[in-house]
Every structure is written in structure tokens, then in C-alpha cells.
């Protein structure tokens, strides 16, 4: 279990469990629908967030580094990392807690794990919205591409890479 305090918020970053799935989903959907609203259409946001389910996080919790940020026992954000490949799969923070250092805490915990695991390069597929966040950590953006959802909806994204520090 990892503990951090930030900007007056009492936040704990810890490994996710199956009991966290509803809170992860709530943070994920709210972040997509609110924080990404300026960069994506209503159709894209709805399709992107509607396909998510609480049980959908269970395989990742079992097989990847999957962390949650908690405030007063409530999940307010999460991060998912695949150490074997070096892929940062997700860093999301509930909009109520965005821009307060929660995403930074989650990413830094992922980064510590990557260094301990001997991962030499990190890569990810960023939403348009999150590109500035990842650039602050030294990620370099590639050419914009898109991710195709199951129904064919295209979600613009940006591949990003950096070496570990």
C-alpha cells in the first residue's frame, strides 16, 4: 500500500481490488464525459463511456498493475500499467478532483513500478485531452491517429513515448 498526501487532500494510492470496480467505473465515465467534452463529440463521448462495465476492470486488476487513488474511502481516480510491455494503459481522475495532483500521484506510482521492473521505455495512446498531462512527464507525441471502438466509432488519440528516468 502506498500513501501520499497532496494539496490538503488526504489521498491514498493503493492496488485496486474487485471491490473498487464500481468506483473505478464512476471515475472513468465522469472523466470521459466531463474532462474530454471539449475535444470529442457527444457521440464519441457517449460511445466511449457507455461500453464500460464494472466487471470489465477485473481482468486488468488481475493481470496488470492497477492502482486506485482514494479520498475518504472513495475511489477518485485510477491508473493501469502493463509492466511486461511498458504500456501505460490508463490514468483517469474524477473531474471533481482533477488538477489537484491526483493524476500526478498515480502516474508517479506507475513510474516507480516501471523503474523497479526494469522497464526502459513507456508508451501509451493518449486522448487529445490528456496530451499536455503526459508531455509534463517527458512523453513525446507521435502523429495523431484514432482508436476504433466496437461499434465503429473512431476516437482520435495520440501515441506517446518516453524512456524511463
Image: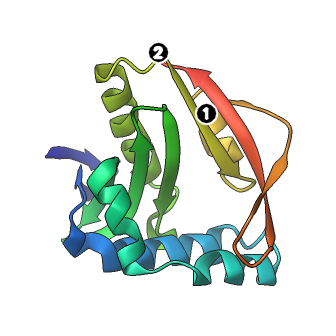
Residue 68 can be seen, yes or no: no
Real-space CA distance between mark 1 and mark 2, rounded to the nearest whole angstrom:
13 Å
Q: How is the image coloured?
A: rainbow
Q: In which quarter of the image is residue 117?
A: top left
What is the residue that sits farthest to the left in this orientation? 1
Residue at 49% x, 59% y: name it.
92
Q: Residue 165 carries which label?
A: 2
Marks 2 and 1: in contact by CB < 8 Å? no
Residue 50, given in percent of the width and then of the height, sits at 60, 84
Given residues 164 and 52, the one toward you in this image is 52
Residue 106, given in percent of the width and then of the height, sits at 38, 46
Given residues 5 and 125, the one toward you in this image is 125
Q: Residue 19 carries which label?
A: none
Residue at 61% x, 33% y: name it.
136
Mark before the other along the chain sequence, 1 or 2: 1
Q: In this view, does 109 lie above or below 11?
A: above
Q: Residue 136 carries which label?
A: 1
Amino acid at each position: 500500500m502506498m500513501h501520499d498526501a497532496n494539496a490538503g487532500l488526504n489521498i491514498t494510492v493503493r492496488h485496486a481490488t474487485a471491490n473498487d470496480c464500481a468506483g473505478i467505473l464512476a471515475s472513468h465515465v465522469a472523466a470521459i464525459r466531463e474532462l474530454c467534452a471539449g475535444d470529442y463529440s457527444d457521440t464519441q463521448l457517449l460511445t466511449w463511456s457507455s461500453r464500460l462495465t464494472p466487471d470489465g476492470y477485473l481482468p486488468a486488476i488481475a493481470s496488470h498493475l492497477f492502482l486506485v487513488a482514494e479520498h475518504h474511502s472513495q475511489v477518485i481516480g485510477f491508473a493501469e500499467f502493463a509492466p511486461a510491455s511498458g504500456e501505460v494503459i490508463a490514468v483517469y481522475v474524477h473531474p471533481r478532483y482533477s488538477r489537484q495532483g491526483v493524476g500526478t500521484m498515480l502516474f508517479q506510482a506507475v513510474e516507480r513500478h516501471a523503474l523497479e521492473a526494469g522497464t526502459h521505455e513507456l508508451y501509451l495512446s493518449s486522448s487529445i485531452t490528456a496530451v499536455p498531462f503526459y508531455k509534463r512527464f517527458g512523453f513525446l507525441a507521435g502523429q495523431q491517429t484514432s482508436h476504433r471502438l466496437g461499434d465503429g466509432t473512431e476516437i482520435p488519440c495520440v501515441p506517446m513515448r518516453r524512456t524511463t528516468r
